[in-house]
Each structure stands twice: as C-alpha cells, then as structure tokens.
Image: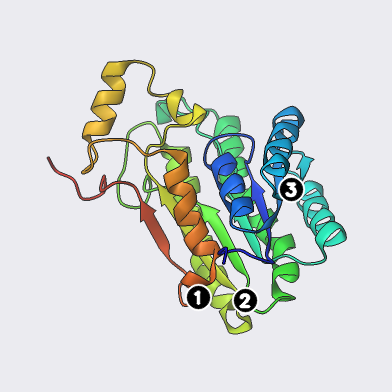
Amino acid sequence: MNLLSNKVAIVTGASSGIGYATAKLFAKEGAKVVIASRRQAKLDALVEEITQAGGVAVSLAGDVKDEDFAKELVALTMDRFGKLDVSFNNAGTMEWMGDTREFELSQWEATLSTNLTSAFLGAKHQIPALLEGEAGSLIFTSSFVGYTAGFPQTAAYSASKAGIIGLTQSLATEFGPHGLRVNALLPGATDTPMGRAFMTTPEIETFVAGLYALKRISQPEEIAKSALYLASDYSSFTTGTAMLVEGGVSINRT
C-alpha cells in the first residue's frame, strides 16, 4: 500500500528542486497534490508529468508572500478534493546575501518575508483545513544554517530559517492536542537550481562537499523521502522536531 493513499497534500515551491521532487514522490505514493509556485509554465509541466504517471495534481501560481494567495491555495484544495491532510511549506530564497554592514533593509525584509512570513501565512490558512481531519501533518523547510552552524554573510537567511524552527515548535504545542503534527525539515546543500547558484565551479562544489561527513551534497529526491516520512503515518508520534537531513555537516570536523 502506498504511504499517502487517500491523502491530499499541498506543496509550495514545487516548480523545481526539493518541492518538485517532493510533489512527484507524494503523488507516486498515492496523494492528490496541489502544487504552487510563481511559475505557471513549470507547474503545468509538472502536473502533466504527474498525470501521465497515473497521479493526480492541480496547480496554482502565485506569490507565497501574499496572504490572499495562501487563502486561495487552501480554497482550491478544499473545492477540488474536499480535505487537506498534509502541507509542505517549502518555498524559500537564498537570493540576498552579503556583508551585513552593507545589507539593505529591503533585502532583509524580502528574505524574512519569503522564508518566514510565507510559512506563517501558509500555516495560518492551512491549519483549519488540516484540523478537519484526524491526524494532519504540517511541514516547513528550514535549514541547518542558523541552527547547528553559522556562515558569514547569511544573517537574513539564517535568521529566517531559525525563525521557522521557533514557529514549528510553537505550532506543535498549540495544535498537538488536536492531533496535528508540525515539523521542520532541515536539508543540507542539495543539487538544485538554488544550490547550483552558489556552487559555480567544480572547485567550490568539491569544497562544499568536503564539509559533509558523507563527502557529497544531496539529491532533491533524498530530501523528498524525508518529507515523505514526516507526511506519512510512519511519523505519527513525531512533532515539534527540527529534522536534520544534511549528511552530517553539523557534526563533521574532518
């Protein structure tokens, strides 16, 4: 039996990378998926791919920083499928980094809005639908950066990802009595378009891989499998966690 049979899942940031891989895996495991990102053409292609593989998917393009979009995404889910079991709030950015002394307020606010405020807005409107079921799962994408490791020139990114962990823990205690599980997934460096933007040469990629105990970066499908665990009933007693899926970078000293 598939791990997500008869479940309905929202996945944001689904047009590429971890979100793309996760949407495909959730659909393969039996979920009806509602995928979201800013790029309609990419979403259309993913819906077609999932459909051709025998899955069920619908999409909505928009900006996760927009509260109206958060509402519309849940409304589409409920109108089309009548319930919501899993939400994977994965959309994020690493666009704005640099010397903190020269960092613009607009860049700080844009980073927090995309990475943290969007997670709050998603949760705010997803939780009522999730609570209508028996055991919903709300998942956020955080990072080991800002949790178990610090890197220079990442102040806004680190703060936003650390904030997601605090949000996760608060929501886990607030809604645990109602059966809702809330967890944060903390990936390491992953072979995605976002990750590749910072690994621009073989030398840089070799250096980054060397930071990890496994001496490599991850593939998005590997992170998707951990998201699947948190989405499925296999994690029925797991809530409030900051789940490291980062190849041992937090503990490596070799």
Crowd around label 2: few <14 · some 14–19 · many ≥20 (10 Å): some
The quadrant the C terminus occupies is top left
Mark 2 or mark 1, earlier in chain = 2
- The residue depicted at 47 percent of the width and 70 percent of the height is 235
Q: Helix, strand, or loop for circle 1?
A: loop
Q: Which mark is residue 236?
A: 1
Residue 195: percent from left, percent from top? 44, 30
SS for tag 3? strand
Q: Residue furthest left?
A: 254
Image vertical order of residue 229 relative to residue 203, above or below: below
Q: Are circles 3 and 1 on residues that touch, CB within 8 Å? A: no
**How far across and down, in percent of the image, does residue 192 sit?**
48, 31
Q: CA distance from mark 3 to mark 2?
A: 22 Å
Residue 45 x/y as whole percent: 71, 32
Which amino acid type is marked by label 1?
Ser
| Placement of 99 over or under 79, stated as above or below | above
Residue situated furthest top in the rendering: 201
Q: Which residue is mark 2?
A: 135
The foreground one among 167 and 100 is: 167
Q: Which mark is residue 57?
A: 3
Residue 149 appears left or right of 235: left
Residue placed farthest to the right in the image? 79
Residue 50 as seen in the image, left or right of residue 237: right
Residue situated furthest bottom in the rendering: 177
First in sequence: mark 3 or mark 1?
3
CB under 8 Å between callouts 2 and 1? yes
First in sequence: mark 3 vs mark 2: 3
